[in-house]
Image: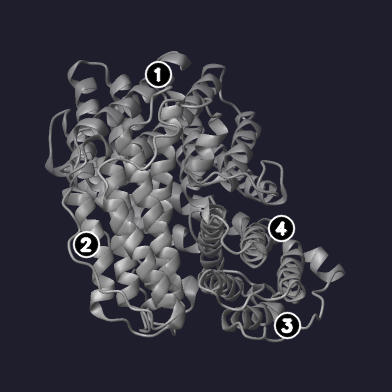
Amino acid sequence: MIRAPRAVPAWLAHPFRWQRLPVPWAAVARGALCAGPLLGAGIATGHPAPGVLTGLGSMLAGVNDRPGTRRTGIVHIGLPALASALGMLIGASLQAVGAGWWVVPALFAVGFVSGAGSVAGPVRSNAGMQMLAATVLGAGMPLPGAPWAKSLYVLAGCLWLLLLRLVVRSPRPAGGALSGERAAVATVFDALSGALAAAGGPGAVAARRRLTAALDRADEALRLRRLTGRLLRRTVTPQELLLAERFAAATALCEASVALLWEARPLPARVAESPRRFADALRTGQPPGRLSAPETSTPGRGAFDQALLDAAVAFARREPSTTQGAAEPGPVPAVREVLRALGGRSRPGRGLFGPAGRDYGLRVAVCIAASAAVALLLRADHWYWLPATATFLVKPDLGPLFSRTVNRFAGTLAGVLVFAGAGELLTGSWWPALVAGAGGALLPFATRHFALQTVAITLMVLSFVYAGGARQAATERIVDTSIACAIVLVVGHLPRLADPRRRVGQRVTSALRATERFLRHVLEAEPGADTTERRALRRAAYRALGEARAAAETAAAELLAARDRNPDWLTVVSAAERIVDAATACAVRLDHGAHRPSVEEAERLCRALAAMADALEDPRRRRDTPVPDGDLRPVPDCATLTDVAAELEHIRGYAGTG
């Protein structure tokens, strides 16, 4: 991530940030084969409307064509595809009955559902956004056809990209049908190697977070494969069980490594090299080779060497240690369970009508309704661009509002100029298909910056609009985009709709509660107890902290007049991350005979953390129930729990602020 100088305010620097990512050449090829050829086929056959609709569907699916395993790709693309088809059905039905002023309350309702669904996770958030965009385009674009036919055309365009996802792929690594999952687990070992190499240095914190993200992706990939196998009533293969055992070895090695990372001392290069050998073994199918020699200088190093030995044993096996569960696929999981595996986890306050859901929904609904009303006043024939622009801007979970607005306007302006230049240079009826193909090829690469992504989408949408018969639409788009940006900036920063304490505070509260559950389990578990539940609680805590950090970073870059009255969410999240790391290091040391704290000491720390979560849950509750002034003194003979107490003291000042 490239960042502007620190002297620049975060809200002003954020529009200039872009991500360093590898070029996804396979996705670029899929993008080039989607919208352009589909639109070209419609023009060549004399049926431009189906070409426009299928191209539109493939464009919406292309936005979600991100790196990942085949199964995660299918769900990440497929669920928003169904939502897009539903949105087109709703919008086309509105147009069929005559989209007058009453379309404003209809879009308000769809916008509320779209915005409120954002609290359920990234997959359902993208699905809600694309449903709303398809509804606006279906209600406004003057294309012939029955509503159900338009919906099927959009779905066909999405399915075309899904088919290409299965055919046009990056070179498959070793592993056959499990290649994607193997690559995800190998990435965990690579990230662990990077974290160990950075231990004790300035990049340790960033490397630690990359390790957490790699664990999340691998866990998602394996869990989704297991759940889809149960949906299909498919028997679990020995290769799947063996890969699951190796991932379990990876998580155990990561847990042991946290104790080394917590010591914050540089490690020998041979220690960081050992996990890299496991990654190479997963990719090539060869043995990992020689590993670092064992050493027991500290409890953390002893735990690491033991986990390293266990991982070597797991990699030496060519058959799983147990076949339990291989014959019985088990009960078919509910769809909700599949969605939870993709980040849409059910937590208190995360429902459609919870506090955060209501705020999200109202913010999106008011912006869309206001944009539609202004557009109908200005030009009733081509009103859809203005609310469609607002759709891609206003979702509060996709980035800071000011940053997205600036980049949207800049990207739209650049896209309109490029499209106009292409119209001057190219002749014939086929050139919009060529421009749409170029935009589709650019779209996967453009995920590194929102302005570049807007350029790609603008080129494609203008091609669809031109092929649909609106020849002079390009200049109107700049005016409409400017108005939409102004509306979103004004409505999106209304005090009630822009207050981050509800949406960010809720995520931080969930993270603190997950942290408290993990800490309590570490301190209350019996010596020698099975570590499976502990690792699951640790993964849940890190996952919740990752969501909280993303929300806090977005809020920190928002343009808010009352910024000084909001808690420093990033400080709270960072302290909670250190608590989880300290508790993990404590668990490793307790496993190796360290002093176990008394029940009173354990309860004191857990109660203090739970009280801080209560205080952060709601601003009104924070005023009515201040954080208690309990004694957070050091824990005798347990350095890591003394660190936990210090971090709790650090959080207390922020949890008690109003």
Q: Amino acid at mark 1?
A: Leu
Q: Is residue 551 left or right of residue 506?
A: left
Of the residues tagged 2 and 3, which is closer to the observer?
2
Name which quarter of the figure residue 489 lies in: bottom right
Q: From the viewer's perspective, is residue 166 above or below residue 354?
A: above
Give the alpha-carbon distance from disc 1 to disc 2, as whole Å. 48 Å
Say which residue label 3 marks. Answer: 632
Q: Please state the horizontal and vertical placement of residue 488, each as a whole percent of the image.
A: 55, 54
Residues tagged 2 and 3 counted as in contact (Cβ below 8 A):
no
Of the residues tagged 4 and 2, which is closer to the observer?
2
Give the alpha-carbon distance from disc 4 to disc 2, as whole Å. 53 Å
* Badge 1 or badge 4: first in the primary sequence: 1
Q: Amino acid at mark 3?
A: Leu
Q: Amino acid at mark 4?
A: Arg
Q: Amino acid at mark 2?
A: Arg
Asked if residue 130 shows in the view, the reply is yes
Give the alpha-carbon distance from disc 1 to disc 4, as whole Å. 39 Å
